[in-house]
Amino acid sequence: MNDTKKKVASKTVSPAKADPKASIKVATKAPVVDVAKAPAKSAAEKPVEKVAAKVAIKAAEKVVPKVAVKSSEKVASKAGASAAADAHSYNPEYLVLMQKDPNWMQAFWNVNDRRVQAAVKGGGKLVLRLYDISSDLTVRNQRNRTFRDISVPADARSWYIENSSQSAQHTMSFGSIGASGKFEAIVDSSQVVSFGSEGQFISATDDRFVRASLGGVGPGGFGSSQFGLSSQQSLPWTSSLAGSSESGSSWGFSSSGNWNAGAAAWQGVGKDFFLWVKTRLIVYGGTRPDANLQVRGERFPLNPDGTFSFEQDLPDSNQIIPVFATDKDGDFPTTIVPIVVKRTE
Amino acid sequence: MARANLLMVLHAHLPFVRSPEHPRFLEENWYFEAMTESYIPMLQLLSRNAEKGIPGALNLSLSPTLMHMFADAMLQERYSLHLVQLLELADREVIRFEGDPDKQQLASFYRDRLRSVRHAWENRFNRDILSMIRQLRDLGKLEVLTCVGTHPFLPAYQAEKNAIRFQLSLTVQTCQDLLGFVPKGVWLPECGYFEGLDLLVSEFGFEYCFLETHGVLLANPPPRYGIFEPIQTPSGLLCFGRDQASSREVWSRKVGYPGHPDYREFFKDLAHEMPKEYLGDYFYAAECPIETGFKYHRITGSDQKEIYQPYRALQLAREHARAFVSNREAQVEDLSPHMEAVPCILAPYDAELFGHWWFEGPEFLEAVFERAAWSKSLQLSTVGDALKDFKADQVRQPAFSSWGEGGYGNVWINPEVDWVYPLFYEMLGQFRDCFRKYRTGGFTGRALAQMAREMVLLQSSDWAFMIHNKSSESYARARVQEHYSNFQQLRKLLSSGRTQSRFLVNLEQKHNLFSWMGPAQYRLLSQ
């Protein structure tokens, strides 16, 4: 479903039920992150790490409370006291790891309170142990497993965990580390593939197909290097992505381009000869100065007198340049589509 | 050179809403609005195209929940009554505006349209939308695709593959039961994809699906031609990536066509302007007015909304359609010389955008068909046609992605909604326990089947979406709680040893989708 659906009737016949979040308590302790065998981070990464750690604490504080348990109890109580009692007569244990986005995963779990109490008895520390099993696909052979431990309080049922930068295959265990330093798992998760934060960047923005896929329309054409993303630029996807409801991308074009007209470098003047011929296309027109103009689906600025123009390379091709305009009130919608066929013999 | 394939994919989905216990239920109106403004007009336009011989086809994804609602006799009957009520209101509106020719013309415009919709519904479609869809498919105007079960956001269930398999099995069975065939293409709810999902989807015989742009662009290894040809995953599933330019032109709040000042204003409905005494009880749920679809203003571009002028807006929609197709032609002309394959442009939208949200959307679509009919460089193709000569050069793994805000799981996995998933995993563990303990036949089998229905209804991504976006939030929360509570009561029923239950009967009548649910289906969940 997408964002525009948000308008559907906003009230309901059904009586409003209690908000499960109303029962949320805020954990008082910040999570402690222990890293074991985690790759060392470069100095350049440090500032990012700091920020991320802050975010982690904030996010974790928000979700640490007994979300699942509390909401379950509330709902069950609605079904009647006896149903509530029955709902807890069989309380399945689980640990679920899910991926939220390239930067975060979420873990949530349900474990019998007595087992948790037994685990922390004598000073045991509760941890989520996140294994990277990418290089250990035989599973039975666990020697290559790297892991990191995330300390969690005894009343936590949910935790957000920062992703590593690389995509990886993970499993997780919830358990305790006793005084001897030995880890005892209480419950294990299934395998999950994470999508590392590095994966959300792309560097090949001089690729005409990447640019065009992102909607790189402009008067310079999809393949033009003068508009759209600059080449060699690394962009996170969130900066250019259209949600299902909103294409917020605004990196379109400007009419004052940085022209570098096919200037094939020519050097040396010895006994030699050369000829090169290239073509450029100039598109120009005019309308009311306060009109709205679109070229190839993008807004295009008008000069103060209502004229507009742009030029672009004209390789052998068919160029179609839809121009759409309305007056300032949106009246008189008009589309004109110049089609230019260029070929060389 | 072969013409490029422009794939117009419309995803039709509504959450399962059906309340036989209430004669009139506010949220059922979502379905009636979508029928009147989107689904029926869309089928009407495709019928007209068939009659006129205009080439091209739409690709229409139908979610299993929507298919069950199409086929439901109670909802069919209620929709017929709904149209009668709307026409009565239209008559009153025409009388009310005597002396105000502009508004009276508009009221008459709505009345004429409603008459046409009712005629199509009662006389041409015989209240059977699915039959009409099959006819248009036979005429080559539609490729029917489907969606997954109750529309769960699948990356949230990556840890429990059998829960995903179960949803896929419900999809296949629904298609066999209600369509008479199983489509080759499947719409992944919210375009949600995670590495490995292709294996599960392929297990159930689906051959292709659709991803957000970066799901394809960030594939490993990267695609040859961006999103302009499908990629093949390790399981053999073909994935098409969304074209951002065609999405932006239609979806964008800033530059999208539907935001033009001449188009109809969505948010000013008669229901909010006239008192209950005039509208009548039918357009009220308790003290809450229910949308009528009678809207008299255009977007205008300011708070002082001006009167809507439908014929001017319809002309604008045709101009926008011309611009839309020309823009796609420009893409094709630019890219074709650099491709060894025929370019393919995926333009996917929610079906309800056309007509319900963007009132003039169906006219836009109709004009897109007419304009594309004489294009030399592209054609409106079915996905199947686009794949006829496609050969994958190598296998690629798409990236984790969705088409929601932010491009990943943030809309459906966040602190506002993350209390929902533990409920599901608790129910799953309890279901497995019950499956081991109780017979799958007779009364206990019926209770197990209903428990499975309540579990999958809780999984609909719609609830998390509404909570996150704070639209119909209380209803969404109530639905999650209702399915959880129903499940727990059924579990209690099983442990009581009773062999009759009014509660179970009522629930079977209310949440009656997947009526064939039995151990053959839910055994998957038990593993």
Image (cartoon, rainbow, N blue to C red):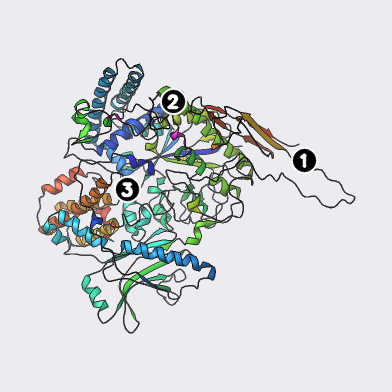
Q: Is residue B329 above or below residue A90?
A: above
Q: Nearer the viewer, mark 1 or mark 3?
A: 1
Where residue A267 appears, as percent x and y from the top left, is 82, 52
Q: Chain of mark 1?
A: A
Q: Position of residue B268 (x, y in %)?
A: 33, 32
Q: Amino acid at mark 3?
A: Gly
- The residue lying toward the viewer, choosing from A164 and A307, is A307
Q: Are marks 1 and 3 on the same chain?
A: no
The residue under label 2 is B314
Say whether mark 1 and mark 2 are on the same chain: no
Q: How many numbered marks appear?
A: 3
Q: Residues within 10 Å of mark 3 (few under 14, many from 20)?
A: many
Q: Quadrant of the C terminus of chain B?
A: bottom left
Q: Which residue is mark 1?
A: A277
Residue A168: which quarter of the image?
Answer: bottom left
- Name which residue type carries label 2: Leu
Does the residue at mark 3 contact the one at mark 2 (Cβ under 8 Å)? no
Looking at the image, is A114 positioned above or below residue B473? below
Q: Is residue B331 left or right of residue A341?
A: left
Q: CA distance from mark 1 to mark 3?
A: 60 Å
Dot 2 falls on a residue whose secondary structure is helix
Q: Residue B165, position in %: x, y?
A: 34, 55
On residue B149, which mark appears? 3
- As for residue B481 lying within the magenta part, the answer is no
The residue mark sitting in front, 3 or 2, is: 2
- Estimate the x, y position of residue B386 in percent, counting from the top left: 51, 41
Point out the stretch of residues depicted in magenta: B255-270
- Circles 1 and 3: CB distance less than 8 Å? no
